Image (cartoon, rainbow, N blue to C red):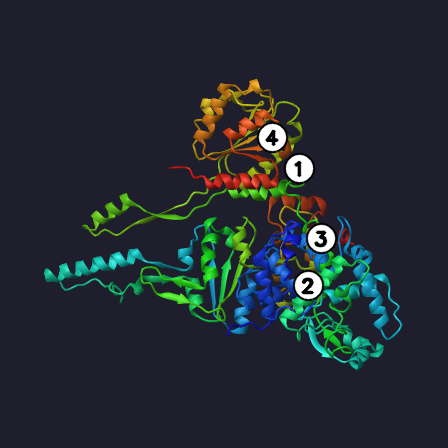
């Protein structure tokens, strides 16, 4: 069932796999999925794992289940209006309406969204056509328009898909069939929305009945999500720039290592035990270190690095103001020989020996493109870099050079062997931090 | 049978329909519900109000930087055990010397290991069907904690240390587990995979009006409107730290004992805005952009 779902959702950068399907199946068995809107919400709860997933999820969902592709930058309305699904739905909707339909495109899209996102939670009761008619009576409008109990006014939809009589197998079969048809038959019409989807006419006897629903109309959220950058991820693999510096900051937060290990305090136990005349009770101390000590070594020589320096500095400055921990910045040119500079202009320096005198708990970030003439990477330089990685176990190199150029640069290849190297992207930083945390400093 | 009826909020708590659905789904599937969202959007309130409304037992585990799975499930109190067993010896020695006074072990018997198992909120919740378990602010935990939880969450079974007592719960009786996080650190993917996820969206103005009404039903409508205008205006300024629901509620609490007219003046004069703005930089920015003390009204229209 839905065997192509994980692959299709993964294309949108979402995490979907067999487990997704298993949970979805379980949800169906438990009767959580009765309408298309239920399917949307259930799947959302399973697939979405962070707010940035909501945008891609909405997109993936519309594409996979409704055959409404949403192009980048397109609004949901626009995508719907342009889709074949909507056209077919509209024809059908207009056909089936007993009275003359005089609706604007906007109204139609709203109705479409209402139907697509109708969840079984919204349904208050199934009413017959007569009641709907009464509800629409203008004289009653004022009374019905009143909001009761803080709930939004009730809306009336004249149709929905009632899947509740269908067995799970039937439902799955139908969904899969509709999907196949949509894929293979471009002109053939969207049966999903036509008969298999929203409309109850293909099944059961609820045909001329309507539904009284409450709730807020699920389409609202979908509409909000599309085009809102808060719900679409900043490209996690784009190079660090002013826009995604916050994303990087979020991942670098991981360097704060906290531990909560209770240890037996042997000296204290002995001392207090002796005082008690040999009654030794274990005395525990809790050890907690929340230290974040960082050395940043920035390559600020050469033109290749120039575009990145500002954002790198911004990143660490933000970090410093936010976390107020030790942060030391030094500069070098291309590679490290016997010294690193304290200021950007490289006028004052400290020797490598002095750098190595820092506590071994420091985390070291190299930031540079590591592109240089091969002879520059001299044995002295290599020795010093090795000394740094040996002393500071948590050392990584962040490289702004796009990953695809790495294999072509000899010095990058060499440096990569010396220091674990990651691209200077929010995602790369995240991986670098994880790598750092996996190594523990021996105490 | 587990409590799986759809719950849409109570008198005091306005539950967003999407959240209500996610919560219902999590309970029906017997999976934990992971709620994220801006601070002060009522993440922690959900299970508390749910438990109160339905009259269920609530176990809370506030996560801190020192949390570990032992505290959460159960631990064996070695210190007490050792102390008590030494006391036995000590008492025997005293008796030998003919001393009357004895040291007490407080009704614990070193023979019975079960006396020394200190049960954590998880073990307690799992031993009571239909309870509610809140794991608050899991992002504050050490990195290993969520991973350690994985086993517990997926096996519905705990084995008590040393005593070997087994606490098991059927899928039907699973407690409703709610986990909250402020996203201060990323949670492991495997962990998230075992939860139903819901991100609480910041409420729109009309919803916020209803939330305020639930908390301060006596407040004048106009006061609320003016306050919310100011509040959403402040949120749009792009401050370092946007004011939250909790804070606007506090602000209005401060205004609640004043006459509506006075309150509106005070709100427009940004009096007590310290309830909303919490950093020096933001305060300066607000002063610069709006000018606290001036009549704010002109800026809002």
- At 54% from the left and 51% from the top, the residue drawn is B189
Chain of the residue where label 1 is placed in the rendered structure: A
Q: In which quadrant is the N terminus of chain A drawn?
A: bottom right
Looking at this view, is A209 or A185 the one in front?
Answer: A185
Q: Position of residue A336 (x, y in %)?
A: 53, 23
Residue B223 in sight in this render: no
Give the image quarter of residue B280. top right
Q: Which mark is residue A176?
A: 2
Cα distance in 3D space between marks 3 and 1: 28 Å
Residue A223 in sight in this render: yes
Q: Is residue B215 shown above or below A74?
A: below
- At 59% from the left and 29% from the top, the residue drawn is A368
Cα distance in 3D space between marks 1 and 2: 43 Å
| Element type at mark 1 | loop
Q: Residues within 10 Å of mark 4 (few under 14, many from 20)?
A: few
Q: Which mark is residue A407?
A: 4
| Element type at mark 3 | helix
Looking at this view, is A22 or A396 the one in front?
Answer: A22
Cα distance in 3D space between marks 2 and 3: 48 Å
Q: Are marks 1 and 4 on the same chain?
A: yes
Give the image quarter of residue A317. top right
Q: Which mark is residue B233?
A: 3
CB contact under 8 Å: marks 1 and 4: no
Q: Which mark is residue A241?
A: 1
Looking at this view, is A222 or A276 the one in front?
Answer: A222
Q: Residues within 10 Å of mark 2 (few under 14, many from 20)?
A: some
* Tag nearer the camera, 3 or 1: 1
Q: Is residue A353 shown above or below B212?
A: above
């Amino acid at each position: 069932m839905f065997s192509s779902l994980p692959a299709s959702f993964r294309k949108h950068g979402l995490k979907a796999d067999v487990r997704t399907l298993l949970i979805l199946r379980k949800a169906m068995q438990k009767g959580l999925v009765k309408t298309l809107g239920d399917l949307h919400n259930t799947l959302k709860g399973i697939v979405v794992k962070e707010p940035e997933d909501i945008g891609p999820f909405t997109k993936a969902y519309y594409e996979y289940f409704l055959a409404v592709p949403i192009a980048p930058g397109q609004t949901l309305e626009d995508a719907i209006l342009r889709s074949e699904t909507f056209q077919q739905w509209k024809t059908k909707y207009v056909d089936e309406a007993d009275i003359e339909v005089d609706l604007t495109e906007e109204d139609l899209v709203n109705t479409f969204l209402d139907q697509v996102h109708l969840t079984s939670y919204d349904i208050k009761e199934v009413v017959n056509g007569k009641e709907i008619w009464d509800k629409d009576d203008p004289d009653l409008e004022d009374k019905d328009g009143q909001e009761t109990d803080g709930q939004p006014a009730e809306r009336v939809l004249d149709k929905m898909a009632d899947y509740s009589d269908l067995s799970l197998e039937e439902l799955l079969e139908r969904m899969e069939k509709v999907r196949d048809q949509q894929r293979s038959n471009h002109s053939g019409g969207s049966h999903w929305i036509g008969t298999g989807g929203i409309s109850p006419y293909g099944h059961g006897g609820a045909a001329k009945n309507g539904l009284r629903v409450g709730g807020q109309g699920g389409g609202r959220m979908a509409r909000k999500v599309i085009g809102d950058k808060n719900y679409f991820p900043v490209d996690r693999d784009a190079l660090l720039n002013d826009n995604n510096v916050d994303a990087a900051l979020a991942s670098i937060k991981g360097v704060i290592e906290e531990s909560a290990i209770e240890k037996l305090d042997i000296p204290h136990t002995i001392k207090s035990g002796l005082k008690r005349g040999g009654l030794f009770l274990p005395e525990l101390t809790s050890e907690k270190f929340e230290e974040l000590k960082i050395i940043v070594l920035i390559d600020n020589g050469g033109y290749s690095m120039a575009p990145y320096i500002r954002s790198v500095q911004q990143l660490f400055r933000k970090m410093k103001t936010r976390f107020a921990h030790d942060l030391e910045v030094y500069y070098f040119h291309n590679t490290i020989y016997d010294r690193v500079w304290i200021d950007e202009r490289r006028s004052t320096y400290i020797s490598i020996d002095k750098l190595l005198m820092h506590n071994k708990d420091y985390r070291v970030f190299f930031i540079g493109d590591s592109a240089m003439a091969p002879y520059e990477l001299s044995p002295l330089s290599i020795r010093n870099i090795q000394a740094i990685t040996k002393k500071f176990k948590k050392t990584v190199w962040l490289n702004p050079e796009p990953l695809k150029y790495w294999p072509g640069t000899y010095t990058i290849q060499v440096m990569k062997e010396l220091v674990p190297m990651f691209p200077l992207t929010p995602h790369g930083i995240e991986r670098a931090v994880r790598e750092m945390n996996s190594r523990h400093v021996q105490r | 049978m587990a409590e799986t009826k759809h719950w849409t909020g109570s008198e005091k708590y306005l539950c967003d329909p999407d959240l209500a659905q996610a919560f219902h789904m999590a309970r029906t599937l017997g999976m934990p519900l992971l709620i994220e969202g801006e601070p002060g959007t009522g993440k922690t309130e959900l299970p508390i109000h749910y438990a109160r409304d339905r009259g269920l037992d609530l176990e809370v585990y506030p996560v801190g930087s020192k949390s570990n799975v032992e505290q959460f499930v159960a631990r064996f109190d070695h210190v007490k055990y050792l102390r008590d067993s030494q006391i036995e010896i000590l008492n025997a020695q005293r008796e030998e010397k003919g001393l009357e006074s004895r040291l007490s072990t407080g009704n614990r018997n070193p023979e019975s290991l079960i006396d020394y198992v200190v049960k954590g909120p998880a073990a307690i919740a799992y031993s009571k069907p239909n309870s509610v378990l809140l794991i608050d602010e899991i992002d504050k935990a050490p990195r290993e904690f969520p991973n350690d939880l994985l086993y517990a969450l997926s096996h519905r079974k705990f084995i008590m240390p040393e005593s070997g007592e087994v606490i098991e719960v059927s899928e039907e009786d699973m407690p409703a587990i709610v986990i909250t996080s402020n996203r201060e650190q990323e949670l492991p993917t495997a962990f998230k995979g075992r939860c139903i996820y819901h991100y609480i969206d910041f409420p729109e103005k009309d919803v916020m009006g209803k939330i305020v009404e639930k908390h301060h039903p006596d407040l004048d409508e106009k006061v609320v409107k003016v306050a919310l205008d100011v509040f959403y205006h402040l949120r749009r300024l792009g401050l370092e730290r946007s004011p939250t629901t909790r804070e606007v509620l506090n602000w209005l609490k401060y205004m609640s004992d004043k006459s509506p007219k006075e309150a509106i003046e005070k709100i427009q004069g940004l009096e007590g805005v310290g309830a909303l703005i919490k950093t020096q930089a933001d305060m300066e920015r607000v002063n610069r952009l709006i000018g606290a003390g001036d009549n704010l009204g002109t800026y809002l229209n």
